[in-house]
Amino acid sequence: MKSTHQDIPIKILATEICEAFTIKLRSDGIIHSHTSSSVDFNVESLKKFNVVMGKMTDYKKAPLLITFDEFAIPPVETREFWALKDSCPYASADAYLAATLGHKMIGNIYLKFNKPGRPTRVFSQSEDAVEWLRTFLPASI
């Protein structure tokens, strides 16, 4: 039987909380960022996020899985900043997991109007998001 990535259990190698973000380095090389609705965030928060992600990835690019609490809504200025190609020098691609209709709508607006400078997609299923992100991993992982 052919082995798939789904057969390999994912371990969390490192976790750091940075303001509204819980950032985890997964054993498959994907960074998972979860945004809390209990803490406001802004462009400066995202810059701090970059510092943490850089340290976790040893300052190399990695695919980024992004999830949100149900009521965590990224402010307009953060969406504008994050869409810039160089806003996150360590993200090779962004996959947003839209758990609610509101998140899906915001994600689609983000894609259409902000036009992110790196590969970005919105997904409804975690498995689909991870499968897509794996295409951005270095061949050695």
Image (cartoon, rainbow, N blue to C red):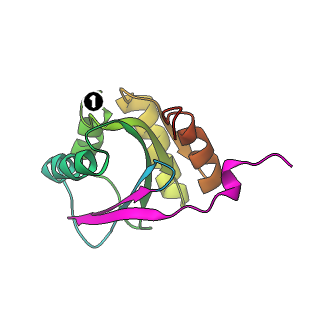
The answer to whether residue 136 is seen in the rendering is yes
Where is residue 92 shown, x and y percent of the image?
Answer: 40, 33
92 to 45, vertically: above or below: above
Where is residue 72 shown, x and y percent of the image?
Answer: 36, 63
Q: Residue at x 25, y 66 (%)?
A: 17
Mark 1 packing: few (<14 Cα in 10 Å), some, or many (20+)?
A: some
Q: Amino acid at mark 1?
A: Leu
34 to 116, vertically: above or below: below
Task: Say which of 44 and 93 sits in front.
Answer: 93
Where is residue 39 shown, x and y percent of the image?
Answer: 23, 69
138 to 72, vertically: above or below: above
The magenta stretch spans residue 51:
no
Q: Residue at x 46, y 47 (%)?
A: 29
The magenta stretch spans residue 2:
yes
Q: Which residues are magenta?
A: 1-26
Q: Residue at x 32, y 46 (%)?
A: 57
The single residue placed furthest to the bottom in the displayed view is 38
Residue, disc 1: 84
